[in-house]
Image (cartoon, rainbow, N blue to C red):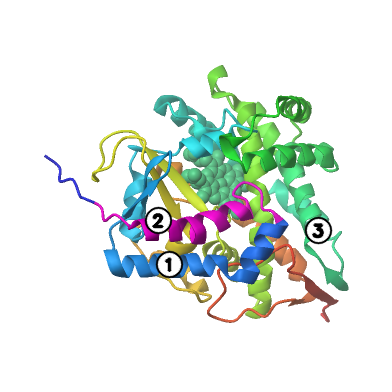
Amino acid sequence: MPTITRLPRVTTAQSLALASTLALPALAQGVIVRRPLGVRLAAVTGADDRAIRLLTRLRAEHGDGPLLVRLPRRGWAVLPLAARDVRAVLDDRAFTPANKEKRGALGHFEPDAVLITPEQELRDRRRALNEQVVRTGFEPFTRVVEEESATLPRDGVLTWPRFHAAHWRIVRRIVLGDGARDDVRLTRQLDRLRRDANWSYLVGRRTDVHNAFKRRLAGHLARAEPGSLAAVLARTHAAADVHPEGQVPHWLFAYDAAAIAAWRALALLAAHPGPLDHARLRAAVLESVRLWPTTLAILRDTTGPTAWDVPEGTVVVIYSPYVNRAEPGHGYRPELWREGGSGGSGGEGTWAGVPFSAGFARCPGEDLVLFTATTLLGALLRGRSVEASVSLADPLPATLDHFRLSFTIKAAER
Ligand code: HEM
């Protein structure tokens, strides 16, 4: 008989503290699309730092093992804190990524996405298609990134709205082709659905907007424009129940997080000047998502017996701001990500958190994100000097408000 571990239960007062200090600020910031006001409030009140301190205190009191928390009308929640428990959950298929709240959220705009597919066999086939398409050769994308970065100012102030709009043009061109470059309407439709998704199943589905979004997307996919992911998708064989086109909303949605990651990486690079080599840029992007994870919580539901004494359907909450910092710390640590080294979350080496998750549902888009972000940062910094509106010194705050972050840009002397 495998041993079943009894997990330490937090007290009622501690459950309330977790609700007000961790859950509420995370929900207020928006888990699917960030809300400017929620992020501003979190930054001003130091909400994410307080949540991390609370978990540090609870770990000191209850030990390293996952915490068990009672949730009203939901049952139990398990909060893994130690790296070994986070790895164990993400590696084990008894914990499904198609968690109830995530299905409620992503169902608003990507009901057929692999991430919320509960049947294992179908999930595996959808996963295989995603991997085949998003891990394609990235070379054609260099031109796209360089052209769009050239539209950004060489002198003056670079603000988030300007950078974000350029990044969306990059994403639409890479995923759907140059013909989608200026289709801001498609992005607006997706944003509308993502704002609903922040409320998960508490709000109804906006089927009119979803249908309009799907029609528009289908029009772009039909062009299968050479040099885009749409072209690779069109020539990749998949059975009808895989819903190849139903995977694409996730690529658009997830790619948007890469804009935030690159923007904050630019702030890290400005604070830690150095040569413009690929390893330095890549480490800055990875540190950006470790220190300020764009996926605030990785959720799983238990689907059968586990090593813990919890009933089926228990939700597991991997709170990334805590697990990404608990062991490597709150400072800028680019050396964690030395290429070919052990940094990252998959292997047995140094623990660097789970910014791209780990295990069988680990993000297949990681290399695409790193390629896009490093190419963009390289293109931006070539010929420009940048100064961030905030000074970033260790220990780094757990919230970095990307909406208000800006950069003073000067054409650099060559
Ligand atoms: C900064 C950008 C990104 C970050 C931080 C990120 C992070 C993540 C994380 C944490 C997960 C696991 C979620 C979970 O288990 O609940 C995930 C899954 C996934 N990501 Fe990404 N991602 C990014 C961009 C992308 C891009 C650009 C693509 C595709 C073009 C992509 C495709 C996927 C897919 C398909 C999954 C689901 C995998 C599965 O269920 O097996 N991601 N990503």
Q: Earlier in the sequence, mark 3 or mark 2?
A: 2
Callout 1 amino acid: Leu
Residue located farthest toward the left when viewing the structure as drawn: 1
- Alpha carbon distance from label 3 to label 2: 38 Å
On the image, the x and y values in percent for residue 223 come to 78, 28
Residue 136 among magenta residues: no
Q: Position of residue 154 (x, y in %)?
A: 86, 70
Is 16 positioned to the left or the right of 44 in the image? left
- On the image, numbered disc 3 is attached to which residue? 161
Determine the main secondary structure of the stretch shown in magenta: helix
Q: Residue at x 35, y 63 (%)?
A: 349
Within-10-Å neighbours for mark 2: few <14, some 14–19, many 20+: some
User: Which residue range is magenta in the image?
Assistant: 7-35
Q: Is residue 96 visible?
A: yes
Q: Which residue is mark 2?
A: 15
Query: Residue at horizontal 28%, vertical 58%?
Result: 65
Q: Which residue is mark 1?
A: 54
Query: Marks 1 and 2: in contact by CB < 8 Å?
Result: no
Q: Amino acid at mark 3?
A: Pro
